[in-house]
Amino acid sequence: KDTLVVTQCGAEAIAFLKIYGVLPAATAFIALYSKMSDVFSKTTLFYATCVPFFVFFALFDMLIYPNVNRLHPSLAAVQAILPGNSQTGGMAVLANIVSHWTSALFYIVSEIYSSVSVGLLFWQFANDVVPVDQAKRFYPLFSQMSGLAPVLAGQYVVRFASKATDFSSSMHRLTAAVTFAGIMICFFYNASVKYIAKNEGVQLSASAVDGDGKKKKKPKMSMMESIKFLASSQYLRLIAALVLGYGLSINFTEVMWKSLVKKQYPNPLDYQRFMGNFSSAVGLSTCIVILFGVHVIRILGWRIGAIATPAIMAILA
């Protein structure tokens, strides 16, 4: 997604897409997901949420990307339609996005899926099957294992996908990996659900299970009721402030350094190769930080652990 958008529209388009593309799309998705959760069982909801993303990625590779020359309007035609001076400033960014709208669409869907797959589907499933008293034991292990994913994916990109003759062939190789991963996700989820039902006698449904193994009904709330409930908790408001600060710092930094990377690697395959190595470095660093970060917080306290990230960013800046 970064390779498509940054090399075609510029790194500045990322901030534009996240505000005017990802945010409304994510809000609409959460509203739809909330409605679906009232209708479907948890197992059906899982498949109904993730499978459409895999279908989109396959269709993009097979139908949309090969026909981008027919689907994309020319930059000059877009600039002629937009008001004001569309050759400089924010209007120039918008013109580039509109003239490469399929890449923008791919970026938005990919951003939503990255949040849905881990942030929503995985941790919801983990919360359903891992008892609270076992969370401290298993959750750090889950995070540690997740750090291996960008290492493997990054090296797949560097050693195989980016070695293609052109970016279209590279897209085929990437989509094949994404499709295989999607099939494995559904397979392992189905196997996990059957194993839990067979060995522990717990069926995943809209009901929770209490300490005595009896089902207890969870009250179903509308989206607005859920927002009011979350806003009423000081604990959750503070977590929201943490997430907001993280998101702002990442997005401000991301635009600057990706624009520098584009200058260094204007060719999409070179850019993709760099991002693959960078992804592997991030995954490896994540594993190291998770391994030692727990001890930093335990010895020096949470405040020092929390200040470490902004302090390092400020020093590097």
Image (cartoon, rainbow, N blue to C red):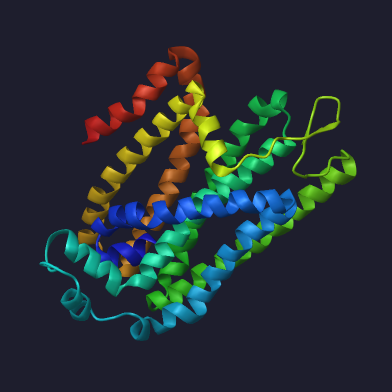
Question: Which residue is located at x 55 percent, y 72 percent?
Answer: 58
Give the x, y percent position of residue 271.
Answer: 32, 63
Q: Position of residue 158 (x, y in %)?
A: 43, 62
Q: Is residue 112 above or below residue 120?
A: below
The residue depicted at 16 percent of the width and 77 percent of the height is 80
Q: Nearer the viewer, residue 116 or 254?
A: 116
Q: Is residue 122 above or below residue 134?
A: below
- Quadrant of the image for the C terminus? top left
Residue 148: percent from left, percent from top: 54, 46
- 49 on left or right of 295: right
Residue at the far bottom in the pictured view = 70
* Quadrant of residue 266 within the rendered picture: bottom left
Which is more toward the observer, 19 or 123?
19
Q: Residue at x 72, y 54 (%)?
A: 40
- In the picture, the quarter occupied by the N terminus is bottom left
Q: Is residue 292 among the parts visible in the rendering? A: no
Residue 2 in sight in this render: yes
Q: Is residue 219 above or below residue 179?
A: above
> Quadrant location of residue 71?
bottom left
Q: From the viewer's perspective, is residue 145 above or below residue 154?
A: above
Residue shown at 68% from the left, 58% from the top = 47
In the rendered structure, the answer to whether residue 171 lies left or right of residue 215 reads left
State left or right for residue 300 relative to residue 185: left
